Each structure stands twice: as C-alpha cells, then as structure tokens.
Image: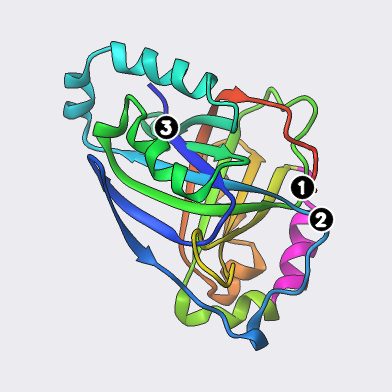
Amino acid sequence: MFCTCYLVSTSILFRRCRGFGYSSIAKISMSNNNKEPSLPATVDFYCLRCLYKDSIEQQQLGKEPWKSHKEYIEKTPSVALGGSLLDKNDREVGRLYLLQSQQQENISQWIQQDPLHSIWSDVNVTIFKRVKPFPVTWPTTPIFVVYCLDDPNNKSIRVEHRPQHRGWWQNESRVVTVGPMAAAFSQDDSLIGSLFFVTGESVDEVQQWANQDPYAKAGLFQQVKVYQWKCLVTKETNKANS
C-alpha cells in the first residue's frame, strides 16, 4: 500500500474525490498588486495528493488493485514522481504524485482510471512550481513531505515575507526539493501553497522545523501537513520547461 500525491501544471484546487466525482474547493484569485515576484526558471508539475478512505475499505479492496495501481503509474510517461504518504504512526494514509506534460482535461480522467480511485476520500490537485531540481541521487535517509496550503484571507503575506522564506529554506541542507503551489485550472495562476521534500528524523521533528518557516510564523498557512514519504516511482525530470 502507498499514499499518493500528484503534481500538475495548471491552476485550481480540487478536493473530495468520491468515485468519479470531484468538486472544486478553492479558486483563489490574486490581484496584480499581490502577485508573487518572478521566480527563476521553474519546472511545473501537476501535484495530486490523494488520501485514503478508512482502513476497512482498503482491506476490502484486496491485493490486486494495489498491484495494478503500481503498474498503472509506472506505465504513465508523465508521472515524474510518485510515492506513499505515511503518518507519524507509520500508517499509510495516501499517495502523492507529480505529473508533467499532461493536458488539463486528462488529469481527472487519469485519476478516475487509477485502479485505486474507489478508495480515495480526498484528491487535491495543484501545480507544483519546482524551484530546486530533483537530486541526481535521492537521500537514503528518511524523506518527508511538507504540504502547506495558504489561508486565502492572508494571501498578501506570501509576497511580503517571500525574501525571508526563501532565505530560510536556501540555508537548510535538509531541503531536497521545494517550490510554491499554484491553483490548478485557473486563469491567473495564483499561488496557494508551498511543497517541500526534506530529510528528517520523524514527522514530529519535521513539523517543528516547518513551524520555523517565516511564512508559517507570519500566519500565511491555513494547513501544514507533514508525512513520511516512500518513493514508488521516480523519473528524470530536471530539464526545465521550454
């Protein structure tokens, strides 16, 4: 079993996947005065965070869908990175995927055709704008995902505190890769969160570290979730967008 989170390139946030249904929970616009300062060359991915229903439904699913799911993501060329999300009790609670070069209209279809789609309770789709390339060799020490969603009422904090935020993570050797998240399938490509892959000792230790983010201290985030991450699929994706 493994947790799934997907990265995608567009702008809207979808949530609550039940069977084939998706409902938008956020379409956050940002005025021209509050736009994020331009970033260096980024690589965009659709990011899909898929959380499981309760464990009973997982057990009733049987073993075959898990095997089929792994084959499904391995055979999808656009999946750049995929893995399981575990909570602090080492219980698998979902998956995270990063997808590249996907048409917007194909994303929901891709999720619906996933052999595990029947046990997703929540599916959040964002665009991960990666600003630090994936390592050539991933660390052998435990890796954690820090998944942050902004409070829409405090969106000006992202611009005001960006220099401090960026200076903070750039001085942290534990950061494997990082970038802001944009709303998916929106017209304005506004930023609505941050995503980190970092090394660490435990979910609690990484949570304490994440609390030191200048964005977090200033009250930008509405939600900060930390998961231990188990890589299932990784492909060469360091080439920048043309």
Q: Name the residue under label 2.
A: 41
Which residues are the magenta region? 161-173
Q: Cβ–Cβ below 8 Å for labels 1 and 3?
A: no
| Residue type (three-letter) at the residue carrying disc 2 | Ala
Q: Mark 1 points at which residue?
A: 241
Q: Name the residue under label 3.
A: 3
Q: How far apart are marks 1 and 2 (CA)?
A: 8 Å
Q: Cβ–Cβ below 8 Å for labels 2 and 3?
A: no
Q: Sequence-wise, which precedes: disc 2 or disc 3?
A: 3
User: Visible in this render: residue 75?
Assistant: yes
Which image quarter holds the N terminus? top left
Q: Cβ–Cβ below 8 Å for labels 1 and 2?
A: yes
- The picture places residue 13, in percent across and down from the top left corner, at 43, 59
Numbered disc 2: secondary structure: loop
Q: Nearer the viewer, residue 154 or 22?
A: 22
Q: Sequence-wise, which precedes: disc 1 or disc 2?
A: 2
